[in-house]
Amino acid sequence: MKLTVIGCGYLGATHAACMAELGHDVLGVDVDTEKVARLQAGDVPFFEPGLADVLRRNLAAGRLRFTSDHRDAASFAAVHFLGVGTPQQRGGYGVDLRHVEAAVDALIPLLRGDHLLIGKSTVPVGTAAALAQRAAVIAAPGSHIELAWSPEFLREGFAVEDTLSPDRLVLGTDPDGDSGWADEVVVEIYRDILQAGTPFIRTDWATAELVKVSANAFLATKISFINAISEICEVVDADISTLADAIGYDQRIGRRFLNAGLGFGGGCLPKDIRGFMARADEIGASQALRFLREVDSINTRRRTAMVDLVADAVGGDVLGTNIAVLGAAFKPESDDVRDSPALNVAGQLALRGASVSVFDPKAAANSQRMYPMLTYAESAASACEDADAVVVATEWAEFVHMAPDELAAVRNKVIVDGRRCLDPSTWHDAGWRYHSIGGPMRAARSQRAPIPARTSASPQVAEAVAPPAR
Ligand code: UDX
């Protein structure tokens, strides 16, 4: 099929390349001419494992092209995916729909005949209905624009895999219209994926829009739930990781997304729960999502708790200390620093008077733009030179597997694990003081060594006492 993808950011660029990988003829459209030039040259403007290969393979095969001219899009295909960004509004919790509206306004008047627009961006419920009305008003006389909404669930770091092998496909169509054409087109586009047994949920616009924000609200709630329990664990010296393993065996609960630590960040979870609350207020259902305020607040509280933990680990105050922060991206396998807990912690430490040296394998350039006052090192080892404490803030594999002697140039052997991703006994055995956010990390009680006397007054500073549970 011939398809266009409007918006070539994270979602759109991945979608365009993956649609071409499925064998379709794809034209990616973006108003940013520099981005278009880079993509056309086979250069992915952000870090996403595997995407460059898919992009280059399909450019070379002639199935994929990029343009900044909406007229190209209008004449190229009758099916258009909409994948522009929907960030949080400045100064408010609501979603900024400026890019969605601009894309519709730029494309629709140029279309002639019958066209299908399939929204993929994450939008507040009611957006599709409003856009359909807008499209009907601005469409050229005699043209017919059908609108469907098919939310995207891809995770950064797994974007190609999630697009080509999604957990499910959701298609929302006009509840008062005939969904036949949209259904037929989507079945044709995703033929291979559907034949592989992927569940396909057909529904109305509002349900499709809500599926996406509800999924992200649930994931955020799960993470904040375990982090709230970790606050209790910190007080009573219990082990949140063992607790998560134990409750995770209950299949109704499940172990995934129960990793306690610095909490969630990125371009989706934080802004999606806020946008969801803002929309609930607008439709008169504020009470329904009031709990998401607490989810948000538990999450941001982790960042301050982490800074306090670092202060305790260096003797009570970070002022005048050298702190190495390993990790700046909001999660591993990504260079995204939007609402990154790691970078937030680095920034807070600097504001409290520490001299902060950050190392991230991929996110240094993006971090530098956002937090220019921090120092950026070329390697974990150089970030740690003369450090009074080393903070692991993003669980990149190279940090999880690093050996203590790689950081031999530190001033004090103090390590603070913000993602509970290190093996405490490895660090303890090498003479380091190991601290983890969320309480002690230890094996089952029967294997526990005696708990040594505390070196810090704070109950949050949990020193490693025995091998980890995981
Ligand atoms: C998320 C959704 O997973 C995806 O379906 C949606 O399309 C976009 O938003 P993403 O933002 O890429 O994807 O990240 P995700 O893997 O969900 O992680 C979100 C954050 O939660 C990260 O900061 C991660 O470190 C944190 N997290 C995740 C935890 O703190 N604990 C966990 O157990 C899992």
Image: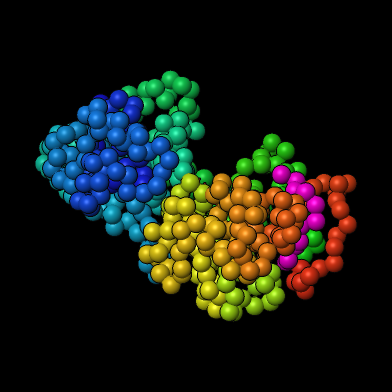
Q: Nearer the viewer, residue 203 or 273?
A: 273
Q: Which residues are magenta?
A: 460-470
Q: Position of residue 231 (x, y in %)?
A: 71, 62
Residue drawn at x 56%, y 46% is 397
- x, y percent for residue 184: 32, 25
Query: Horizontally, is 415 left or right of 21 in the view?
Result: right
Among the 4 quarters of the image, the one containing residue 102? bottom left
- Residue beneath the point at 64% across and 58% down: 417
Q: Is residue 272 magenta?
A: no
16 to the left or right of 377: left
Q: Is residue 180 left or right of residue 66?
A: right
Residue drawn at (41%, 37%), measured in percent from left and top?
Answer: 50
Question: What is the magenta segment's predominant secondary structure?
Answer: loop
Horizontal and vertical percent position of residue 66: 21, 40
The x, y position of residue 271, in whole percent, is: 45, 57
- For the image, the number of numbered tags is 0
Rendered residue at 64%/78% (across/down): 317
Viewer-proximal residue among 356 and 5: 356
Residue 218 visible at all: no
Q: Quadrant of the N terminus?
A: top left
